[in-house]
Image (spheres, grey):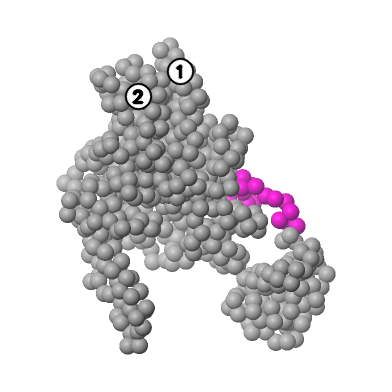
């Protein structure tokens, strides 16, 4: 008997099978049986009662009677294959599904934002209030903020051409160690810089980014240059458009100098050309997936960068490299022209040297473009005069509490020598990880003390108790759909990493995720949006350690996060493990940065940046940079 997937779904429904996984597994098993026997793939796959039993066991449904199995098969003979028909469309990564996620499950009005502030009090105030001296040499400003660079440019103490050439030279010099370049856009950059100098000289000032060089994570399309997504098999891919974010930064007068590395298809810091490195400790990776943007900003090789986050890809490298990263509210920045990984979780955002720099960049790139339908017309206004002391500040209490005492795995009475060795290795890794977390906790607690010294009355809060981790298969299911052709064609073999936790295997596993359960997880996500949003009716800002449950929860709910450097580990810090497995951000060792994270309500990104700026002015941690010898 033969049958197609669409007909089989209908027959399963008639037989009382409600799990969407069951027919999916069965269809896959039948196709595999075809391949094993060399059957013509153009013919519909053949199904047997034995295959139904196998699929039912994998799906966790059944068992079924012989009569039910016969009815399922007989009812689907000679049906056409809807799945194969869809596959023949060869959908590109740029084609989004016919649904849109907006993180407003609570169905409350979106904040409109404060009234536009007067120009001297807003962006111009970030620059015109500072009149610096000309640097003795151009490289002295390699680690300057956007505000400082803008003041030098507008007062004509430096030129954009000189600044651009300096950053290009540094990108070439330090790429040998840090491996953060994929493509330099030198010709484009120098042409833009010359135009910026002419406009500034003529008094045609475009704003605080005018003449300032920046780098793009290489998932943003730029005309005339490869857009590689960091992945083997895509090294020569070109996309004949500029991403919306690139267009907006061009319009703001910023100078694109490089397309920077990302882990292959936005996972980790390993790409087809190697591993991007941490400027504070080049023996380690820079973490990912916005590996190149964070490394290049931290190394003083660009004025700022654009990264992206789906589940930690701005947060993680900003922590490892000691940069300030702003993951905006989902739907604040259009993703048109950017690689899609998860249509309901991808966010584009700035990685900079300060919270204020993040705000200056976000002002230029936010807002609808008429193409990315997930973008909501929420306002973003940056006001240097905003009184941050009026904000109600909470802290995620459980994140700062002392952890339970360490308990190693207990030996089994019948343990073999091999099992004992593995248990001891696990115990050692767990003990070392615990020591690092215990050491870093002192920096988290110091944040609370500093905020109290700033006059902040901290309010304890807790995240709603929901199974956030159980919702994350939404991401891999969408990612598997976005790169369906890789799995079906076998080209996933070209990707650099091929382990159990890497994309090729994750894409294969995701094909067995039930459609019904995908919908159920989205319904649970609605609860998460509602309940996390309710916290921000009690407070305006939440202070939290960077890692932990909040990172997963807020990426699912779409709430914005600001990750800022929070000091350097001392000489007494636990030494890093011999190998960086790419899974932990706390392994830097002595002399490397730690971070703290601030959260805010949906579309309250301006308040978030204002509070982050106040904290940075009180601490100065963002002014510390690695020695210029990496």
Element type at mark 2? helix
- With 295 as the anchor, is 82 left or right in this view? right
The magenta segment: 85-106
Residue at screen point 77% across, 69% down: 39
Q: Residues within 10 Å of mark 2 (few under 14, many from 20)?
A: many
Say what secondary structure mark 1 lies in: helix
Quadrant of res 580: bottom left
Q: Which mark is residue 150?
A: 2
Determine whether, in the image, residue 99 is placed left or right of residue 104.
right
Q: Position of residue 23 (x, y in %)?
A: 67, 72
* Image quarter of the C terminus: top left
Question: Which residue is at a point 51% across and 25% down the rendered structure image?
Answer: 188
- Above or below, comparing residue 108 to residue 52 in the picture: above
> Which one is nearer the viewer's eye here, 77 or 600?
77
Res. 56 in view: yes
Query: Can you say whether 461 is above or below 595 in the image?
Result: below
* Numbered circle sitting on residue 381: none
Residue 270 lies, in percent from the top left, at 45, 50
Residue 100 colored in magenta in the image: yes
Residue 535: horizontal and vertical position, in percent?
36, 56
Q: Residue at x 63, y 82 (%)?
A: 62
Give the labeled residue for mark 1: 194
Reply yes or no: does residue 237 show up in magenta: no
Q: How would you classify the magenta stretch by its main secondary structure? A: loop
Is 95 placed left or right of 421 in the picture?
right
- Where is the N terminus found, in terms of image quarters? bottom right
Disc 1 or disc 2, which is closer to the eye? Answer: 1
């Amino acid at each position: 008997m033969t049958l197609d997937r669409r007909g089989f779904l209908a027959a399963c429904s008639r037989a009382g099978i409600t799990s969407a996984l069951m027919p999916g597994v069965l269809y896959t098993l039948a196709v595999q049986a075809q391949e094993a026997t060399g059957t013509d793939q153009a013919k519909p796959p053949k199904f047997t009662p034995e295959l139904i039993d196998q699929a039912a066991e994998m799906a966790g449904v059944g068992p079924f009677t012989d009569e039910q199995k016969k009815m399922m098969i007989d009812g689907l003979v000679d049906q056409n294959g809807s799945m194969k028909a869809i596959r023949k469309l060869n959908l590109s990564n740029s084609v989004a599904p016919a649904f849109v996620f907006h993180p407003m499950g609570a169905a409350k009005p979106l904040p409109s934002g404060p009234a536009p502030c007067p120009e001297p009090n807003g962006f111009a105030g970030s620059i015109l209030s500072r009149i610096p001296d000309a640097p003795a040499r151009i490289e002295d400003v390699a680690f300057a903020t956007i505000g400082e660079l803008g003041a030098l440019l507008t007062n004509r103490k430096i030129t954009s051409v000189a600044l651009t050439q300096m950053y290009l030279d540094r990108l070439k010099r330090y790429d040998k160690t840090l491996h953060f370049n994929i493509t330099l856009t030198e010709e484009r950059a120098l042409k833009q810089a010359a135009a910026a100098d002419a406009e500034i000289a003529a008094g045609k000032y475009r704003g605080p980014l005018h003449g300032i060089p920046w780098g793009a994570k290489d998932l943003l399309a730029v005309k005339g240059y490869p857009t590689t997504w960091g992945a083997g098999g895509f090294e020569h891919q070109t996309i004949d458009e500029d991403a919306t974010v690139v267009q907006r930064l061009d319009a703001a007068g910023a100078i694109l100098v490089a397309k920077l590395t990302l882990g292959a298809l936005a996972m980790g810091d390993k790409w087809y050309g190697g591993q991007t490195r941490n400027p504070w400790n080049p023996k380690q990776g820079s973490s990912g997936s916005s590996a190149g943007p964070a490394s290049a900003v931290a190394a003083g090789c660009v004025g700022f960068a654009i990264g992206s986050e789906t589940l930690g890809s701005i947060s993680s490298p900003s922590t490892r490299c000691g940069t300030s990263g702003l993951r905006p509210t989902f739907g604040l920045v259009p993703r048109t022209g950017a690689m899609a990984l998860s249509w309901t979780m991808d966010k584009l955002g700035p990685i900079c040297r300060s919270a204020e720099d993040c705000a200056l960049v976000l002002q230029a790139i936010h807002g609808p473009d008429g193409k990315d339908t997930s973008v909501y017309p929420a306002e973003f206004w940056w006001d240097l005069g905003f009184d941050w002391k009026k904000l109600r500040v909470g802290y995620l209490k459980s994140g700062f509490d002392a952890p339970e005492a360490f308990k190693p795995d207990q030996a089994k009475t019948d343990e073999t020598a091999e099992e004992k060795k593995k248990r001891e290795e696990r115990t050692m890794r767990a003990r070392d990880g615990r020591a690092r977390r215990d050491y870093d906790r002192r920096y988290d607690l110091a944040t609370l003390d500093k905020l109290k010294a700033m006059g902040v009355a901290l309010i304890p809060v807790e995240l709603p108790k929901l199974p956030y981790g159980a919702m994350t298969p939404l991401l891999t299911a969408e990612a598997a759909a976005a790169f369906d052709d890789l799995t079906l064609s076998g080209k996933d073999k070209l990707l650099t990493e091929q382990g159990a936790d890497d994309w090729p295997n994750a894409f294969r596993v995701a094909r067995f995720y039930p459609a019904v359960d995908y919908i159920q997880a989205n319904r649970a996500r609605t609860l998460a949006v509602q309940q996390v949003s309710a916290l921000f009716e009690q407070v305006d800002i939440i202070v939290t350690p960077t890692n932990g449950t909040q990172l997963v929860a807020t990426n699912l709910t779409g709430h914005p996060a600001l990750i800022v450097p929070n000091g350097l580990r001392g000489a007494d810090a636990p030494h890093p493990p011999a190998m960086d497995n790419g899974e932990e951000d706390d392994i830097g060792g002595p002399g490397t940065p730690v971070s703290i994270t601030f959260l805010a309500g949906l579309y309250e990104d301006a308040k978030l940046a204002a509070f982050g700026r106040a904290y940075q002015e009180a601490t100065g941690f963002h002014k510390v940079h690695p020695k210029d010898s990496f």
